[in-house]
Amino acid sequence: MYLRRCYRQKDGKRHGYWALVESYRTSRGPRQRVVAYLGEMDAAGRLGIHQQAERPAVSAQRDLFGEVEPQWVEVDLKRIAVERKRAFGGPWLGLELCRQIGLADFIERTVVTGQEEIPWPVMAQILILARLCHPSSELHIAEHFYESSALSDLLGVPANKVNEDRLYRALDQLLPHKEALEKHLKHRLGELFELDYDLLLYDVTSTYFEGEAKQIPLAQRGYSRDHRPDCKQVNIALVVSREGLPLGYELKIVPDTDGFAKFRWKKIDRWREWARLSEGCYLLRSNVTDWSPQELWRVYIQLTEAEAAFRIQKSDLQLRPIWHKKLKRVEAHILVCFLAYVLWKTLAQLCQRAGLGDEPRKVFQELAEVALVDVVLPTRSGVTLRKRCISRPTEHQAILLQRLRLELPNSLEMTRV
């Protein structure tokens, strides 16, 4: 990264300001993007930015910094304070997972941006990360979660720019790219974890609606796995790999000729008696003839991965109940839950690789305790300095980060979109 001198015309005069610019590679060659607009800065300010830059500036830019001595101030130790503690570990870890599976880059390339003040790809990331870290409604995200988390610092979107309407519209922008997202994830997860797609596992569950859901054709009555027969529901079919990594899903329901969900049952006493006598035994039948009994049993047991996926989505990610009243918003809600689950299972795979077992929930909860705070430093001269700092990880957290090959930044400076 490097500093770029920029100019603009205002009131017939030429005004200069500084921007922090990052170079990156694309398939069409190197490109540059502005990380932050810094305004007017003196030499000392430019030196501070230079020290924070991850890459050295090119020789042509070194004259910007010059030979500037750092400024020193005396701090009043009795008045040092800590303000605005925010949740940092969970959102930061979620962004790291997005980076590893290329989710953020894919959304930025795919979701169309226009004249909106906050880009839709950024708002879509807020929805996914909120679903991973603290599942709740769009209203709760806007009024409570976002401000109490470090997402404004990590994504550069001020808290007053995140509102319920903007989040709803981001759902609308994300949904049309469902199929492309599934194709991207299949390729990237297969590449990242060397997945074998010779066998895919498939399971069906349902989730229910609060309210009458009159405008949603998929909402029908039927057997409720959630023990809410009083509510309409929608069936969800999930496809996962042998390792339990989610690859795609579909919304489905089987109506009769009148549009009502079909449900048939019949009591057969002799089958019931046979089930009682054979309780505790399994009989597996398959059209695959070249597998051994052991292989067939192992694959059957792997179906529990799909079942576990639904349990995580319904409990940890709060797939249920659905409060939306429009079909497209329902579909987008389920898509966001699906993408958050992809991040969850990515963490699970990383934990297994690192020898941390099969409990990503514990790892996530432990790292989520890392906080972001503002340290207030009153000086003898009367000027108050504020430094945004990340809490030092505990010994256990440091071990987890080291095993996962992740490194917390030492400090964080806010950038604005």
Image (cartoon, helix red, strand yellow):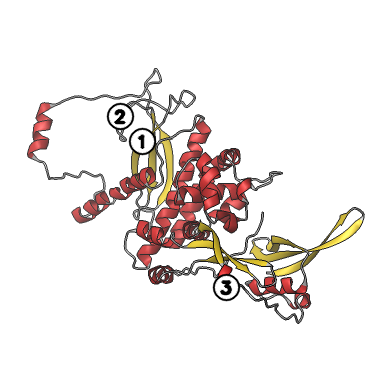
Reading the image, the residue beneath label 2 is: 223
Which quadrant does the C terminus fall into?
bottom right
Which numbered disc, 3 or 2, marks the residue closer to the eye? 3
Reading the image, the residue beneath label 3 is: 77
Reading the image, the residue beneath label 1 is: 206
Mark 3 or mark 2, which has the lower sequence index? 3
- Considering only vertical position in the picture, is 103 above or below 65? above
Mark 2 or mark 1, which has the lower sequence index? 1
The answer to which of 282 and 291 lies nearer the viewer is: 282
Q: Amino acid at mark 3?
A: Leu
Q: Which type of secondary structure does the marked residue at label 2 adopt?
A: loop
Count neighbours of disc 3 (C-alpha within 10 A) and say few if under 14, some if 14 to 19, many if 20 or more.
Answer: few
- Considering only vertical position in the picture, is 164 above or below 91? above
The answer to which of 342 and 30 lies nearer the viewer is: 342
Q: Which type of secondary structure does the marked residue at label 1 adopt?
A: strand
Q: Amino acid at mark 2?
A: Tyr
